[in-house]
Amino acid sequence: MTADSTSSPRNYSAPVPPSTPVPPSTHFIDRLQAATDAALSTAHHPGSSFDGASADLHSRLEAHVDALRDELVDLMLDLAAHPETAFQEHRSAQAIVDLLARHGVDAQLGVHGLETAVRAEINPTPASADDPDSPTNAPTETPTGAPVVAVLSEYDALPVIGHGCGHNVIAVMGLGAFLGLKKLADEDPAAVPGRVVFLGTPAEEGHTGKEYMAREGAFDGLDVAVMAHGYGYDLADQLWLGRRTLTVEFHGHTAHASAQPFMGRNALDAASLMYQGLGVLRQQTPPSDRIHAVITSGGDRASVIPDYARVEMYVRSPAPETLRDLSSRVEDVARGAALMTGCGVTVGWDQHPPSLPVRTNEALTGRWVEAQRRRGRNPLPRGVVSETLAASTDFGNVSYRIPGIHPLIRVSDSDVALHTREFAEAATSDLAKSGATDGAYGLAASLLDVLHDPALAQAVKDEFESAGGAIDVPGYFD
């Protein structure tokens, strides 16, 4: 070997990473879409074998809801133009109360422990009418023996992108359903034989407003609760995952990172090991489970061994039992990372109450399907749209207390994802305007059926009990 060859630098070109991120491949989404398109041609929901309310009552209810269309659309657009995030929905809640007042409904604002929660009733019991500050003192049945039913609205928005989950549409669907039943009751008291409760429920995005309200008695004495959510398809049912939040703090010892690194206990190492451990854990979890985390604190200067690191994460699973199992395994990973690095660890679950999966009541879902077919829609059965596209909602907590439904109604094109600016635009579109009215009728019709069909009401109750009945939501993960 010559001297020149030994002294010359190596001649090669290192790959240079691009300055912009590589776009994600769409191949998996494309395959999911192809599978959905193939299933659409044969998918059919069986509907309902129950009679429900009479055709005449449904025609009259439908006319009342359709007459509300302009007011519902105006409010839907107004909420979209003035988005408010969780617990800050003061203007939105007041707008709902004002619209109720214009139709002769004296609604309560600031109930069940939340300043922006709303409650109103049709056929209120004497207890709730005489004492508006104590709306939960009502008996579980009306004097007629009819069930006590509720329709829910959400109206909080996402930071920055506004109503990217379409809660402006959810708000007016629930409100329109309640007002449609109110108009029917005013016209003919016998047409709405039971109590109907409207609940405006704040803080669904990133929080659990319904659980806070539940712990203050919002759902006590109710037999059924319904709401609907905007989406890119008409779906009778879809998977909603339970969700818990977890904050893990690692505590170490600082040291000079060059002179005496051996005198430190590196909290960032612990956080890094936990993050890697979660990645390994995913291989041994069901494909329906979700774990996502960020390291929000890990030191300030590279020359100092960090004595503090913080990991924040979501844990999701499709059943209460599997969510509890996954929670235990994730906590083991955190404690193992602390042991490996000699750090202390503080594990904090559920800064806000957890969200349970949605337990859908099939007997009630069938009535929603029949109502939507009346409006020219054809809600698809569960499983047509891939269940890998799953999110979470605090309505799950309601559905494990009382029977309920949370169907999805088409307000956008199928390729528009929730929690995007594109969906915020779709939530003011013509599809959203028609969806708001169709959804309002569907929710009102489903409740009207329960009020008039004792066999349906009993089937709804029996199905809920056979699925396990009510669970102790606040204490479930203790």
Image: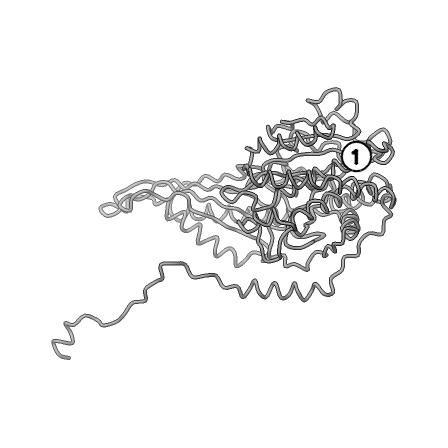
User: Which residue is depicted at the point 82% across and 52% down?
Assistant: 48
Judging depth in this view, the residue of 127 and 245 nearest the camera is: 127
Badge 1 crowding class, 10 Å Cα cut-off, few under 14, some 14 to 19, many 20 or more, is: many
Residue 354 visible here = yes
For the image, the number of numbered tags is 1
Q: Position of residue 34 (x, y in %)?
A: 62, 66
* Direction left: furthest residue: 3
Judging depth in this view, the residue of 311 and 14 nearest the camera is: 14
User: Which residue is depicted at the point 68% across and 22% down?
Assistant: 133
Where is 282 relative to 445, above or below? below
Q: Position of residue 448 (x, y in %)?
A: 81, 40
Taking the image as shown, residue 425 lies to the left or right of residue 334, namely: right
User: Which residue is depicted at the point 75% across and 43% down?
Assistant: 66
Judging depth in this view, the residue of 403 and 55 nearest the camera is: 55
Taking the image as shown, residue 207 lies to the left or right of residue 342, namely: right
The secondary structure type at the circle numbered 1 is helix
User: Which residue is depicted at the point 68% across and 34% down?
Assistant: 199
The answer to which quarter of the image holds residue 437 is: top right
Q: Quadrant of the N terminus?
A: bottom left
Q: Which residue is mark 1?
A: 183
Q: Position of residue 279 (x, y in %)?
A: 47, 55
Taking the image as shown, residue 275 lies to the left or right of residue 406, namely: left
What amino acid does circle 1 point to? Lys
Where is 222 relative to 431, above or below? above
